[in-house]
Image (cartoon, grey):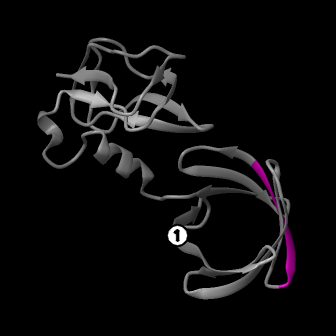
């Protein structure tokens, strides 16, 4: 999986290479293998030993593509997929031959947290239309083309299923 720390320009690839049992793992970060032992993990955070050094990570907030952590008393924002917005945008009708598509559809089930547009508003391709929350993560749903908002089908606090129409863009 591709990761990026907000203050560091480059991203890195991390994955589990081998589960050695008893909470011991061999992990690979950018082609370098490391020894990882998980000491304790719960809903608040994780204690672990990485290459024979003790570390703690406390979870602060988690969104669809970002996680805010405090690792060894240093706040860090971790982007778990640096191209997540592009993936959601493409799958909601953006890019390709989707410009003829009127309906902007939800690509995830979730609760409508906020709505950034109103009926008859003009939007540009990529503008945020609404924000959905799913599994305590938030994702911005963006316009798949330039247009005028027509038939807005959502309300704050309501839920949508994957594939539900959010609005038409004419």
Is residue 91 shown left or right of residue 134?
left
Residue appearing at x 18%, y 27% in the figure: 102
Q: Position of residue 65 (x, y in %)?
A: 53, 50
Q: Position of residue 91 (x, y in %)?
A: 30, 45
Q: Which residue is mark 1?
A: 11
Residue 151 in which image quadrant: top left
Question: Residue at the front extreme?
Answer: 21
Secondary structure mostly taken by the magenta-highlighted segment of the chain: strand
Residue 16 is one of the magenta-drawn residues: no
119 horizontally vs 148: left or right: right
Crowd class of label 1 (few under 14; some 14 to 19; many from 20; radius 10 Å): some
**In which quadrant is the C terminus drawn?**
top left
- Residue drawn 26% across the image and 37% down it: 144
Query: Is 42 located above or below residue 168 in the figure?
Result: below
Direction from residue 144 to residue 161 in the image, left or right: right
Q: Position of residue 61 (x, y in %)?
A: 70, 44
Residue 45, placed above or below residue 154: below
Image location (x, y in percent) of residue 120? 26, 12
For this view, does 67 lie left or right of residue 155? right
| Quarter assignment of residue 106 | top left
**What segment carries the magenta color?**
52-59
């Amino acid at each position: 999986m591709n990761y990026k720390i907000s203050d560091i320009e480059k991203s890195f690839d991390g994955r589990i290479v081998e589960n050695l049992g008893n909470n011991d793992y061999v992990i690979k970060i950018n082609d370098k293998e490391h020894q990882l032992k998980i000491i304790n993990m719960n809903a608040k955070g994780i204690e672990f030993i990485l290459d024979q050094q003790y570390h703690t990570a406390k979870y602060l907030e988690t969104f669809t593509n970002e996680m805010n952590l405090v690792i060894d008393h240093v706040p860090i924002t971790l982007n778990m997929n640096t191209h997540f917005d592009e993936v959601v945008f493409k799958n909601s009708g953006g890019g390709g031959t989707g410009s003829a598509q009127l309906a902007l559809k939800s690509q995830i089930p979730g609760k409508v947290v906020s709505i950034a547009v109103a009926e008859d508003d003009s939007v540009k391709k990529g503008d945020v239309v609404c924000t959905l929350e799913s599994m305590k993560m938030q994702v911005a749903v963006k316009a798949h083309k330039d247009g005028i908002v027509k038939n807005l089908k959502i309300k704050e606090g309501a839920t949508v299923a994957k594939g539900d129409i959010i609005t038409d863009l004419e």
